[in-house]
Image: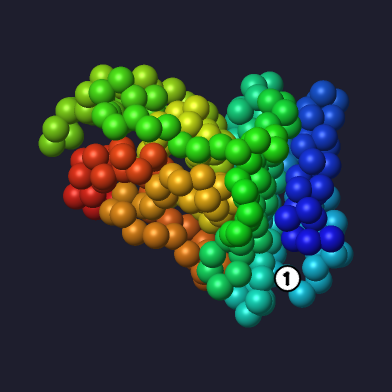
Amino acid sequence: MNDLDLILQAATEAGELALSARESGLKIWSKDGGSPVTDADLAVDTLLKTELMAERPDYGWLSEETADDPARLSTRRQFVVDPIDGTVAFMKGKPWFAVSIAVVENGQPIAGVVHAPALDETFVATLDGPVTLNGAPIAPSATGELLDCAMLGDAKMFGHPAWREPWPAMRVESRNSIAYRMCLVASGAFDAAIALSPKSEWDLAAAELICRRAGAWVSDHKGRDFAYNRPVPTVPSLVCANKALAPLILSRVGHIELP
């Protein structure tokens, strides 16, 4: 079984487990730092690690719900995984969560799956194959103006008085899962997604490949590319957009110095 088939099968099983666990009732607590986690997050993580590492014992492992092992840094390939991206939506009974799995080699994703089980939506990409949603090809929108564009982000952020130039009126919505937001841009359902706060490699890896293969732009707010399997697996921000809007967004946010 090739890497893509392997992670696709695992993501599907993980999605079924997540939905079943939610129906049965979740145990919820707070991690260090205050973000919520459920027993389903851990169960899905265990399932994925057990299945994937059994098939690829020489791969490294990086997951939100597994203590980081620096041994991954010396492996040829790595699984970069968010068992349930969008835990807040998941635990509140909303559908905006996803299982995100990427295979990374030389710092870049080479296979990726983002599976939203409550929506029955599965985004898939490889470096040299088609990028699809439920088997059908996808592409970003052609929107060329920020005015009235469909934007994923924090409406309060866009309305903050400190911007050098006020943002035009946009149709701003929110989705808890970062990976799913990016896939919505890749598929043209939204025009762009912006997050001016740190994101983790497991939020981004699979979705970045899907976006790039579809023809969308992905970078941090200063236009810098991402690399994966780094010692500290975080990035400062995210700009994901169709390629017409990306320069318009970067010109507005690139001057910001984030902590």
Q: Residues within 10 Å of mark 1 (few under 14, many from 20)?
A: many
- Quadrant of image for the N terminus: bottom right
Q: Residue at x 66, y 76 (%)?
A: 76
Identify residue type, mark 1: Tyr
In the rendered image of this protein, does residue 20 appear above or below residue 179? Answer: above
In the rendered image of this protein, does residue 8 appear above or below residue 162? Answer: below
The residue lying toward the viewer, choosing from 232 and 96, is 96
Q: Determine which quarter of the picture holds residue 142.
A: top left
Which element type, helix, strand or loop, lies under badge 1? loop
Q: Residue at x 46, y 46 (%)?
A: 215
Q: Is residue 203 visible?
A: no
Where residue 125 appears, as percent x and y from the top left, is 62, 50
Q: Residue furthest bottom?
A: 74
Where residue 204 appears, as percent x and y from the top left, is 53, 50
Q: Residue at x 56, y 73 (%)?
A: 106
Q: Determine which quarter of the picture holds residue 226.
A: bottom left
- Going by the image, does 66 lie left or right of 189? right
The residue lying toward the viewer, choosing from 128 and 31, is 128
Where residue 54 appears, as percent x and y from the top left, is 86, 64
- Quadrant of image for the C terminus: bottom left
The residue lying toward the viewer, choosing from 181 and 49, is 181
Q: Is residue 254 visible?
A: yes
In the rendered image of this protein, does residue 156 appear above or below residue 197? Answer: above
Q: Which residue is mark 1?
A: 59
Q: Residue at x 66, y 67 (%)?
A: 78
